[in-house]
Image (cartoon, helix red, strand yellow):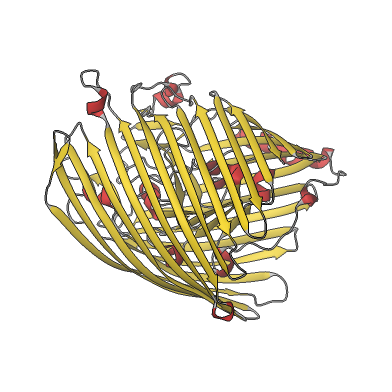
Amino acid sequence: MKVKLLVFSLILFLPLVCFADNSSLFLDEIVVEEKASYESDKKSGFNTIITREEIERRGYVSLFNLLESENSVSIRSDTGSDKFSVIDLRGMGEASGSNVLIVVDDEIVNSSDMSAADLNDIPSSLIESVEIIRGSGGVLNGAGAVSGVIKIKTIAPEKNKALLNLNYGSHETLEKSLYISHKDKIHSVSLSSIFYDSQGYRENSFYEKANAHLKYENNFSDSVKFGLTGFVLKDKYGLPGGVSIDEASDYDKRKKTDFPFDNGFTHKKKINLNFRKNFLKYGTINITRGYSYKDNDYLMGYSPLISEEDQQNSISTVSKDLRISHDFTKDDFSFVSGVDCFFDDYVRTSRTESLRKNGQLDAKDFYFSGFLKKEKIRLNFGVRYSNSKSKFREDELLNGRGIKGDILNKDYNNNALELGITYTPFDFPMEFFSLFSKSYRNPNIDELGFSSGSLSPQQSLNYEIGLRFFSNSFLKAETSAFYLKTKDEIYYGEDDQGGKFNKNYESSTIRKGIDLNIKLNILKNLFAATGFSFIKAEFEDLGEEIPLVSDLKYFAFLEYEALRNLIFSVDYSYFSSKKQGSDIYGKLSRIPSYDTVDFALRYKINKFSFFIKSENIFNEKYFTSAYENTCYPMPERTFTAGIKAEF
C-alpha cells in the first residue's frame, strides 16, 4: 500500500510542475443550459449530484465504477463482475440490495426478489446525471429507501443527434451502443441500443446482452404533454461460483471455477405511458402508468445425470404501477403530493426441489412533500402513508404443474417522515444542515418464500447534521455526521439446525459515521477531490459488527488537462477489512482490506472522443464478498479503449 500511495502522490503533483502554464480549453467548453430539477435541491443532507460533464471528463466505463468514487458508497460482487453487483450505501451490508432504492428516469428498478437492481442496462455514455440522496428519500420514493436513494437520469432527446460508442478491452470485452434522437416543437423521440459481449475474468464468467430503449414525447399544446417509453433486454451469463479464500491469493487458481456449466439468461420488457397537464397557477398534474415483465431462468449445480431441462430454475415477475402526482409552486413555497399504486405477481420455480413459490404484492401509498425557502433558511418536510397486502403460497410441482399449498396473507401499514433544515447564518457561503427521517421496508415475496415463519416490516430512524462551505468555483467542502437505527432488520441467516431462512434480527442495528468531501479547482486545468467515510455498523444489544461492512473508506481523484483537449485522470480508493457474510459473531477470517488505483486518458477533437482506461493498475488481488470462507475474486489489471462519435 505504501508503494501505491507514493506513486499516487507523484501522479498527483507531477502535472502541476510540468504544465502549470497551460490554459484550459476543453473544460471551458461546457454550455450552461436551464438547470435540471433534482430532488436533492429541496432536501437537507449530505447529497451528491454527478453531472454528464463530470462523467465524460473522468472517463468512467461503468456506472459501478462511477458510484464507487463517492462517499459512503461501496460495490459488492458475488460473481466477480458487474453482473449481480450490489450498491451499498452507508453500511447496509448483506441487505443493501433491498435497502438502497434505485430510480432510473423516475422509475424504481429494484427487483421484487432478493437480488439487487440490475444496472448493467445503462451505459455511462447515456447517463445525464446521477443523484445520491443519503439518509432520506422514503417520502417521495417509498419503501426501501432506508439508507437513501440513487436517482439516475438518461440523456434527453436533442434535435437530429446521433451518438456512436465503441469500447474494447480485457477479457475480449466488446461494447457497442448507438443513440439517435430528433426533437422539434411538437415531437421528441430517441432510440438507443446496446450490445455487450465479454468472456469475463474467470472461467464461466461470460456475459452477453442486447437491449433497446425508446423514448417518445408529444407536446400536444403549451399545457399538455404525453409520452411513452419502451425497453427490451435479453442477456446470458455464466455462474462461476466462488473459490476458497486461500485460492484467491493465487493468480491462476482465483480464475478457476468448479461450475463450468452453470448459467442463466434474462428477458425483460417494460413500457411506461405518461400524461402531464399544466394548470398554470394551480400547478401540474402528472400521471404515469407502467408495465414490466421479467423472466430469469438459471441452472446452478449442474449434474450430468439429469437433463438440463429438469435442472432449470426460473423466476418470473409481472409488475404494474400507477402514479399520480400534483406539483405546485408559489413564490418561496412548493409542494408535491400524490398516490402511488404498485402490483407485483411473482413466481419462482425449482425443478430440482419440485417446488413453486408464488405470490402477489399490492401496495397503495399516499404522500405529501413540501419545501419552503426564506432568506437564510430552507425547510423541507414530508410524510408518506403506505398500505401493502401480500399473498404467498408454496406449491408442490407434479408433472410440471403446481398443487396448491396453504396461502399466507400479510398486511402491512407503514409511514415515512422527513424534516430537514438548511441554515445560512453568514454573508459568506457557508451553510449548516440537519435532517430527521423515518423509513420502512416490507418483506418482498421472495423473502416470505424463504422465511422461517413470521416476518415483520423493518423500521428505521435517521438523524444527520452537517455543514457545507464553497468559495466560488475554487473550493467546495462538506461534512456530515449521521446515526441510523433500524428495528426488525430483515436478513438471510441460519436457524439452530443449520437451515437457511429470512428472518428479522432480534437486536436493533445501528449505523453511525462521518462523511467528508473536498473538491478543489486548483487551476483552470487542474481539479482534485478527496474524501473519506467512517461507518461503525453494529448490533445494539450484541456489540458485534454487522457483516460485509468496511468501517473506513478513503478516496482521492485528480483530473488534469495536460495539453489542449487531452485529459488525464487517476482514482485511488481504499476499503478497510470486514466480516464475511452471515458471520455475526466473527468466527471466520475477515475479508482483507484492499486499495486500487485506476488511470484514464481522454482526448477530444471536434465530434470525436477517444479514451483509454486501466483499472486496478497495480494488480491488487482482492474480493468484496465472502461466505463461509468462499469468496468471489475481482479482476486484476484491466484495460479498456474506446471511441465516441457525435453527430
**In front here: 347 or 38?**
347
Residue at the far right: name it.
21
Give residue 339's quadrant in the image. Answer: bottom left
Q: Quadrant of the C terminus?
A: top right
Q: Is residue 451 left or right of residue 643?
A: left
Quadrant of image for the N terminus: top right
Residue at position x 39%, y 62% in the image: 322
Provide residue 204's location: percent of width, then percent of height. 41, 23
Q: Nearer the viewer, residue 539 or 300?
A: 300
Residue 409 appears at what percent x and percent y?
A: 18, 59
Q: Residue at x 26, y 65 (%)?
A: 412
Horizontal side of residue 263 vs 612, given as left or right: left
Q: Is residue 239 visible?
A: yes
Foreground pick, 503 / 364: 364
The residue at 23%/51% (across/down) is 359
Q: Residue at x 25, y 54 (%)?
A: 360
Task: Give the x, y percent position of residue 375.
Answer: 66, 81
Left or right, residue 530 beside residue 493: right
Q: Residue 218: x percent and y percent?
A: 58, 59
Instruction: Tell me: residue 275, above or below residue 549.
Output: below
Quadrant in the picture for residue 180: top right
- Number of numbered tags placed on the structure image: 0
